[in-house]
Amino acid sequence: MIGMVLVIAPDLRARGGISAVMRVLSSGGLFDARRGPHPRACVPSVDAREPKETFEVRHFASARDGSLAGKFLFSLYRLAIFAVTRLSRPSLVHVHTSTGVSFLRKSAYVWLASLKGARILLHIHPGEFWDQLESAGVLRRRAVMSALRRSDGIVVLTEVIARKARSVTTGVEISVLPNAVNLKELAIHPRPAREEALIAFLGWYVKSKGAFDLLEALVTVHIRCPEMRAVFGGWKGSSTLKNRVRTLGLADVVDIQGWLGRDEVTSLLSRCTVFVLPSYTEGVPMVILEAMGCGAPIVTCPVGGIPDVAIEGRNAVYVRPGDIQALAETLLHILNDEKARTEMSRANLMDARRYDVTVVIKELRGRYEKYLVGN
């Protein structure tokens, strides 16, 4: 046996981008769901020239949803469990992290894994992490760099982000691994026809995702396209968003829903005329990959890793973050151009194959084997 891989990430049932990534990887077979809350799997070597050795992959839930106090206590409890967990030799600890408090918590896992003699693969999801590090004060920068340098490898989501990361830090191998989408789960047979003038948004109801900018743009869109309807699916700030809908006089045409289940997301992305994500900052949003996998035309912003997967003029149309008038005009153009929508839909279905979970897991397993063999 080559060894064991312990994947440090939020609970698979939690809401958020990293949890969504982990659910897709789990659905693709990275973990064995038969093991319950901390699944495991025996994974064959991906190189047919090597002996048919195996390694074990386990998910270790580091966080879960709940109240602030509940989340804090659970995080401390899980960190304590990890501290006393004996790791087999050789071991690789694959730590998934975001920015801010998330990175602070995951840094503790990095230090503990280092003390245990494990190899460490640090998976940094947001692209803005590197901009924040570049502009950080001396003390914060030193603390972050210390955790980065204890890692044997750092994974980012796109080559654009990787170039930025290499310009900010040195001495650690930085590689690219895109997020994955499970195309098999997104398939609907027969595929439904797209509904007329249906606009979809999926994400947190916060300024950085552009949810409120989209509402402002829909005022103009509704005036010039009265048959327009919009469905918002997401979490955080629902009451504020609903109040804004009423203030803008859009209550009859905009439906603000809560967190949607997997089937509901697939249905909406397969039926909508256009999917819109006017974000100010992103890594590679899972929902963009899901929209591609469902063949939805996309309107979004060229931020973070989005330009690496959603190509303007092929499967997406870009607007500048915060440009509400341009967003309204773009949506009106897309709603009135069936040929452009058909071409974008076809391109999305084709391009999504590059990010299928089977492709990404094969590459990820190759990374695991590389670091374990090199231990």
Image: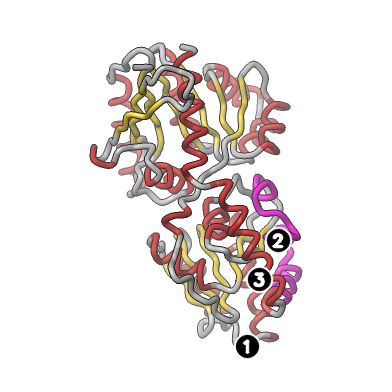
- Between disc 2 and disc 1, whose residue precedes? 1
Secondary structure at numbered mark 2: loop
Q: Nearer the viewer, mark 2 or mark 3?
A: 3
Task: Please provide percent x and percent y for residue 299.
Answer: 66, 64
Task: Please provide percent x and percent y for residue 182.
Answer: 46, 51
Mark 2–mark 3 Cα distance, whole angstroms, equals 27 Å
Disc 3 residue crowd, few under 14, some 14–19, many 20+, Cα 10 Å = some
Q: Residue at x 48, y 74 (%)?
A: 192
Look at mark 2 in the image and give the residue it sits on: 322
In the rendered view, tell whether residue 129 sits above or below residue 315. Answer: above
Amino acid type at image mark 2: Gly
Q: Magenta span has 342?
A: no
Of residues 276 and 338, the one drawn nearer to the viewer in this rendering = 338
Identity of the residue furthest to the bottom in this view: 226
Disc 1 residue crowd, few under 14, some 14–19, many 20+, Cα 10 Å = few
The quadrant in which residue 249 appears is: bottom right
Of residues 98 and 182, the one drawn nearer to the viewer in this rendering = 182
Q: Residue at x 51, y 68 (%)?
A: 270
Task: Please provide percent x and percent y for residue 193.
Answer: 52, 77
Q: Nearer the viewer, mark 2 or mark 1?
A: 1
**Mark linked to residue 226:** 1
Identity of the residue furthest to the front in this view: 49
Amino acid type at image mark 1: Pro
Tell me the magenta residue range. 305-333
In the rendered view, tell whether residue 78 sits above or below residue 190. Answer: above
Amino acid type at image mark 3: Thr
Mark 2–mark 1 Cα distance, whole angstroms, equals 24 Å
Disc 2 residue crowd, few under 14, some 14–19, many 20+, Cα 10 Å = some
Task: Please provide percent x and percent y for residue 277.
Answer: 61, 61
**Mark linked to residue 342:** 3
